[in-house]
Amino acid sequence: MSVAVITGSAGLIGSEAVRFFAGLGMQVVGIDNDMRQFFFGPEASTRWNQQRLERSVPGYVHHDLDIRDFPAIERLFSQYGSEISLIVHTAAQPSHDWAARDPFSDFSVNATGTLNLLEAARQHCPQAPFIFTSTNKVYGDTPNRLPLIERETRWDVEAPHPAAQGIDEHMSIDQSKHSLFGASKVAADVLVQEYGRYFDMPTVCFRGGCLTGPSHSGTQLHGFLAYLMKCTMTGQPYTVFGYKGKQVRDNIHSADLIAAFYEFYQRPRAGEVYNIGGGLESNCSMLEAIALCEEITGRPLTHSYVDDNRSGDHIWYVSDLRKFKAHYPGWGISYDVPRILQEMHALNQDRWVGA
């Protein structure tokens, strides 16, 4: 049987990948040791999702492994060998703020963990597509140098500037403030590209905008849409950091991202890079997201504002999806922000309000 190895398998993107590729008849091997609880506390634990996968996905095999432990990772890859036909690497430390608290843990998870997986793949299944969830933070704060204009509820880039179509893969990753998280992801991103080019392996970096969906264990430091909806539903206070609340993010639903993974899996390329997010079809400012959450829930959000933005944070980031769509014309965005939030509200009543 064809085997898919998925890291961060109990997280938002990992669990969506587990269900999708198991649905294709693949044997899914998950790697996840609930580091998210270590990073962000009990409210961010993914154990609930792991248990749901073990109950509901036939044949799913879970391994409570740390991707920093190369001998353990190498043994697992050796066990399945050439039967591995896909690796989806979503495990990460995902927060700017947290990385500054513990740079060694951040770098070892994001960079060394990625190197361990790439080397295990090279040794045991070099033909398997290696899909890496990178981040738009590899561009650092360079997007903040765009000619931004202020509107009533958001910042924007006006045509005819090329970035009005979104930020493409030609933006420089040099001479900018990345945050330590961004730096560790740059290291991983470049490693994934290099294994593809140097060893001719089918590797890809998906530089994601905001990845979201109903299975997100959102917390203050990561997963803003999920955490925002959770706060609106429960009455928990929310803090907006800087930029007048007009900062813009594109948001891609986990199902749309996995559909992009599947396109690459079917027709892989070596050492490829794609910016991926909601693009022009699915983006919002913080103020716009708050208004949508309040409209959907019928409740006001208890929130406060502080002038200080998070260091290196983007004012405006929308992904240019044209390169990926040109390579894979059958793919497109199916969820916009209102639909994402409506689904998040509908499917988390018991988990958030009933808790």
Image: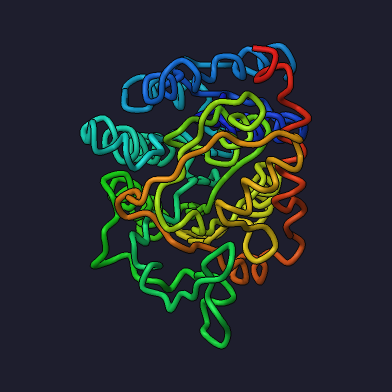
Height in image: 217 above or below 48?
below
Q: Quadrant of the N terminus?
A: top right
Residue located at (22% from left, 36% from top): 103
For residue 297, what is the image quadrant? top right
Name the spot of residue 114 as percent of width and height, x first. Answer: 37, 39
For residue 271, what is the image quadrant? bottom left
Height in image: 21 above or below 30?
below
Name the spot of residue 221 as percent of width and height, x first. Answer: 42, 35
Residue located at (32% from left, 44% from top): 181
- Its colouring scheme is rainbow
Residue located at (62% from left, 45% from top): 290
Residue 48 visible:
yes
Residue located at (35% from left, 47% from top): 185
Front residue of this view, candidates 288 and 278: 288
Name the spot of residue 28 as percent of width and height, x first. Answer: 63, 26
For residue 347, what is the image quadrant? top right
Q: Is residue 325 left or right of residue 82?
A: right
Residue 83 visible:
no
Front residue of this view, candidates 300 and 241: 300
Q: Quadrant of the C terminus?
A: top right
How many numbered discs sit on the rendered protein? 0
